[in-house]
Amino acid sequence: MEEVDRISSLPKEIKISILSRLEVKDAVRTSALAKSWRHLWTLLPSLRLGCYLDRLGDPPNRGFPPRLAPSIWIKRVHHLVSSLRNPLLHFELSDYFRAGQSLLLQGLLDLLLQKGGVHSLTFSSLFGFPKYRDCVLVKLPSFPSLKELTLFGCRVLLPTGFRGFHRLTTLKLQNVFIFNDDLNLLIHPSYNLTTLVMLDCMAPKYPLSVNISLPLLRHLAFQINGSIEKVSITSAPCLEKAHINVEEIEVGDDHRLQKLARMTLRLLTSVAMVSSLRLDNSAFKCLSECALPISFTFPRLRHLKLLLSIASMDKSMFDVFLWLLRSMPFLEELEWESLHSTWTERDAVLMKELFLKRQDGLSCLNQTLKRVTMNMIIWDVMTSTTVFKFFLLNANVLKLMKIVNWSSEVEPSMIEELQKAEVTSSNAKVVIFFDKKDVTINFK
């Protein structure tokens, strides 16, 4: 019986779909399979290239890349894109780029514009936090079809006469230098934006003043830092999820702390209609410096996530925690990820004073909070369990407490402590996950 080449007989669209799931170098090699596969890779609609993705045949580079490697590689990518016969819809490029590769990169971006049809563009320079003049420069062409833009670790400039990406729905900027006027040109004309992420954004000269007026915005992640002079939300009626991050503040820098604290509270109260909120440790620290509005509420909020070190909590930060619970009458789920920290005897005493008390008048604890997830490395059992006991004691309708223990094992003393805890919910359950195992404690 003759062998039948069923793969080669597949429709062209299915073959291209198969190639899209391969690394680029493997997709190119399929040209040698048969005549029907020859140059089929030139119809690929997307490319994902980078030091952690596809190095176009380079050997694995486990150390710091050679200084000239990125320049040589950009030329290879340029040749690859030139060979494509269809518009390139999705393009992702990442490596350890520096300022010296800016002109080569610009030629590549201009080529993408000539190809037309780019829907999503991701560019990442992975050198961390270099100085402004060391950063690779990204001068964005006016891609008419662009819907998603992600930039990381670079300087950003917009061309003269730029009028905005009117089809843009997702904008993610992280660790970028950008002028205030260019930032506003990116944000304001993008009326279709549903996702806006601004983390570690810095201004080359004057501070950034950010005004968000986006009628379709649903997800906002924003970091407040020293380069931000002002941030305000004048219109975001569809906003559902907010992540508020604040840069780490050096001890003793009271002036900066007060400035960031005012912006943090202003931004937090302007996202009152979200259903999901995420706050980090520095945001908590800033809020502890503010006079919190007593009558403020989040009327739609159902999910709260905290990236908060338990050991760093003092009385003022605990008051912020209670204020949040008080302002969220319909909270259903709380996630708490405790950052790495070491315990002291003082921490243990303070935790007991703060957490092992009955809290009255908190609507979410009385009526709606049903699920609590704790993610942490448990160094001190007695101190950690005080936080667990807080929810067992106060959450009257709690159904599940999920404890994800990053340690390798669960000490029997922790299970014993939890079994002795006072529980107000009539059907609560604690599940402790560790090392691909789990231990369940039922309370009835």
Image (tube, grey):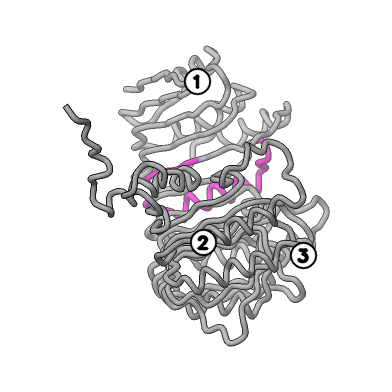
- Upstream in the sequence, badge 1 or badge 3? 3
- Label annotation for residue 25: none
Secondary structure at badge 2 equals helix
Q: Residue at x 52, y 34 (%)?
A: 375
- In the displayed structure, 407 sits above or below 40; it is above
Q: Residue at x 60, y 55 (%)?
A: 76
Q: How many marks?
A: 3
- In the displayed structure, 179 sits above or below 223; it is below
Write down the residue under mark 3.
132
Closer to viewer: mark 3 or mark 2: 2
- Going by the picture, which residue comes out furthest to the left? 1
What's the distance in space between the residues labelled 2 and 1, CA to CA?
A: 45 Å
Callout 3, which amino acid? Tyr
Q: Position of residue 63 (x, y in %)?
A: 72, 37
- Going by the picture, which residue comes out furthest to the bottom? 161
The stretch in magenta equals 311-335
Callout 2, which amino acid? Val
Secondary structure at badge 1 equals loop
Write down the residue under mark 1.
435
Q: State the residue in front, 280 or 92.
A: 92
Write down the residue under mark 2.
81
